[in-house]
Amino acid sequence: MLGINVTNKTSLMRYLALPQPEDKIQCMYIWIDGTGENLRAKTRTVDALPKTAKELPIWNFDGSSTGQAVGENSDVMIHPVAMFKDPFRGGKNQLVLCETYAYDGKVHPTNKRHTCVEAMEKAKDFKPWFGIEQEYTMLDTDTHPFGWPKNGFPGPQGPYYTGVGANKVYGRDVVEAHYRACLYSGVKIAGTNAEVMPAQWEFQVGPCEGIEMGDHLWIGRFLLHRVAEDFGIVITYDPKPMPGDWNGAGAHCNYSTLEMRQPGGMKAMVAAIEKLGKRHATHIRAYDPKGGADNKRRLTGLHETSSIENFSYGVAHRGSSIRIPRQCSDDGCGYIEDRRPSSNCDPYSVTEMLVRTTCLNETD
């Protein structure tokens, strides 16, 4: 039986098929709210498609309703920083990623992108590349994992990872729709797969250089929420959505500099890892929105994770903090995989920390 909140998508398509005036473009402004992990959005009409996002008008929103201001001084400003094609409205319509600022022009405390841009500019000669493996879990609107028995549990983990078949994977329609939406929008989606826990999936974004990593992952997340909305499914990036003997969800970050990618780059890879080991606690605090509290539920040393307390690395070792892929070890160059970031991390914070520690040699 359909819930009362389910609408008829066929009726919607009749209206979306109506001709749109050439001089009217819908721009959906998107920003990160006070939680540091949820997204908000609203739309305005502009008369022409700009060449860059920064040509769009600065706008504002009610920060008292997003955990970013008080009611007595509620306006938070949103500054457009990146544009992507809108796969839901089509045509010239755009998705517009924004940074948040206070009314007086000061960077808002929830704006992690601003300092990330500064770090990437300082480290640009290193040509830092990133790829993030975004794990997530699908839920029914009652927040029960999608496809799981309502009064029990599915069979133990084993057949679900990269699985095929109705008894092994749940929600593939959402995955395929999201993949195509990302390609259309210009998000650098690299792939996708079913994950270890049933109803858990992953999509990969990258390689991206510098600030582009955070921009593309946040829009990829927005698109996933928005696509799943059309299917009546809820997406959670909780790093441990189901307690017990079930895998958690991470956002493993693949990282390299130009030196690492060149022949003989293994030396630079190991040097970077040793720097990361000296700032393990600092990175852990930056790798989830709650300063490590969310990751503590996930990084237990079980279920293909390292312990949150200890730093480790190894070749092809999925129980380590940093994994050196086997192929990179054989080639003597390539990239490293930081397996510590939680699925609900802010990619701006993660990539900024990697660059500040390994390229800019910042210490605690």
Image (spheres, grey):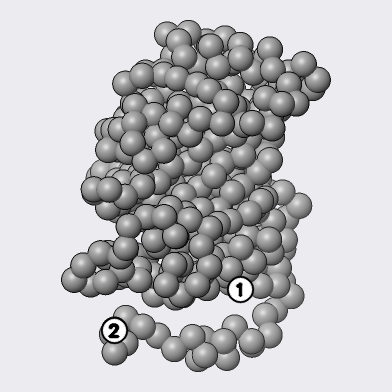
- Quick one: label 2, few (<14), some, or many (20+) residues within 10 Å? few
Residue 176 versus residue 2: which sits nearer the camera? 176
Left or right of 335? Residue 62 is: left
Q: Helix, strand or loop at disc 2?
A: loop
Expressed as whole percent of the image width and height from the top left, the position of residue 198 reads 39, 61
Q: Amino acid at mark 1?
A: Arg
Residue 73: quadrant of the picture: top left
Residue drawn at x 59%, y 83% is: 16
Q: Amino acid at mark 2?
A: Gly
Residue drawn at x 71%, y 26% is: 330
Left or right of 11? Residue 83 is: right
- Quick one: label 1, few (<14), some, or many (20+) residues within 10 Å? some
Residue drawn at x 61%, y 14% is: 270
Residue 174 vertical placement versus 119 (above, below):
below
Expressed as whole percent of the image width and height from the top left, the position of residue 341 reads 44, 34
Q: Which mark is residue 89?
A: 1
Which one is earlier in the sequence, the residue at label 2 or at label 1? Answer: 2
Left or right of 306? Residue 25 is: right
Residue drawn at x 50%, y 21% is: 313
Q: Which mark is residue 23?
A: none
Residue 248 versus residue 225: which sits nearer the camera? 248
**Residue, disc 2:** 3
Residue 24 vertical placement versus 333 (above, below):
below
Q: Helix, strand or loop at disc 1?
A: loop
Residue 345: quadrant of the picture: top left
Q: Residue furthest left?
A: 151
* Rendered-image quadrant of the N terminus: bottom left
Left or right of 214? Residue 247 is: left
Expressed as whole percent of the image width and height from the top left, the position of residue 344 reads 40, 44
Residue 295 versus residue 219: which sits nearer the camera? 295
* Rendered-image quadrant of the C terminus: top left
Expressed as whole percent of the image width and height from the top left, the position of residue 174 reads 51, 69
